[in-house]
Amino acid sequence: MKKIAFLTVVIVFGFNFGFAGAFKDLGNGARAVSLGLSYVAIANNPYAMFYNPAGMTEIKKFGLATTYSRLYPFIQDEKLHYLTLSGVLPGFSIFDFGVGISHFKIGMWSENQVVLSVASGFKGLSVGGNLKFLRWSAVAPVGESNYSYFNFTFDAGAIFVWRDFINGSDLRFGMVLKNITQPSIAVNKSNDAKLPLEISGGVVYVSNSYNYLIGLGISKSEGDIKADIGVEILAFSSEFLKDRFEFILRGSGGAIVEGGRQSSLNSGFGIRYWKFKIDYVYVYQFEISDAGGSHKFSIEFNF
């Protein structure tokens, strides 16, 4: 079973032995995961800094959010946990600020990220950037010192919204560059362990009249190019105890179209009531179906 656990992590995370998750995006926010790569053109909740910091300009109130992920539950010998906490503080003149923290653990290996974000917008165009602090640690065999690593890098993103594109509907475009400095994550700073530059883009059509959106996304990292499509629709809305209750359905699917082999389907839902937002997504990856799908739960509170 431990062999299965090791092979699963290698396939999913695509890392060199000794570098676990390699600070890859393991799903920060159930809504973002359920919409796929097109979320880089939305990114309008406290998880924005993990996908496109430019989206923070659309957040009007201070918000906090957290996500817990149980990755591949059929792997019994190694429990994979991923936890995210983030917050956005808008309203400081022309700038909005955010902070995000993520924690990944598998066995004796753990990874942590702290993301400091800033964004600014004018009319339909928003831009933003991240300063990311990266740290991993691993428990060494008896008699040896534990291993650890620390470095930093930058992200940058932009979103343009063409409002009233057709009959009150909007068309959104987003682009983000991650790991701009491509730091090495090896203790000896080996070039073979550099984090790859990731480039992602998306376009989303938002129907404000019929309460749905549909988007396309594409990303490139090293030799892999991935594309997917995501949809979201307001399935039910009603007044309940003087507040609006909403139930939302979402889904996405995509695959690597050039390079490696990986495809997935994501399906989820969201509940909106008062100042709370609760989201869930189930992620199924076809190439490692024996490991089981991943479950992600998110809670957001807006003050």
Image (cartoon, rainbow, N blue to C red):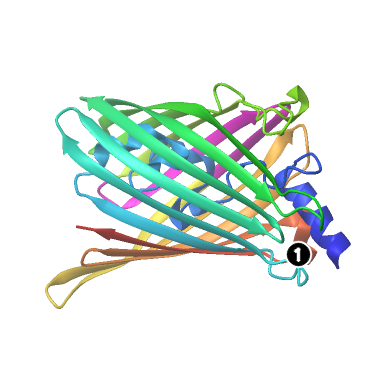
- The residues colored magenta run 208-229
| Image quadrant where one finds the C terminus | bottom left
The quarter of the displayed image where residue 60 is located: top left
Of residues 109 and 16, the one drawn nearer to the viewer in this rendering: 109
Most extreme residue toward the front, as rendered? Answer: 143
Q: Which residue is pictured at 36% across the width and 43% down the height?
A: 99
Against 109, is 14 above or below? above
Describe the element under mark 1 as helix, strand or loop: helix
Of residues 287 and 128, the one drawn nearer to the viewer in this rendering: 128
Determine which residue is flagged by label 1.
Answer: 291
Q: Is residue 35 visible?
A: yes
Q: Which residue is pictured at 43% across the width and 39% down the height?
A: 115
> Label 1 amino acid?
Ala
Residue 74: x and y, percent? 74, 71
Q: Is residue 166 visible?
A: no
Please tell me whether residue 225 belongs to the stretch shown in magenta.
yes
Of residues 175 and 248, the one drawn nearer to the viewer in this rendering: 175
Q: Which residue is pictured at 51% across the width and 55% down the height?
A: 251
Residue 244: x and y, percent? 19, 67
Q: Which residue is pictured at 78% across the width and 42% down the height?
A: 261
Residue 112: x and y, percent? 55, 47
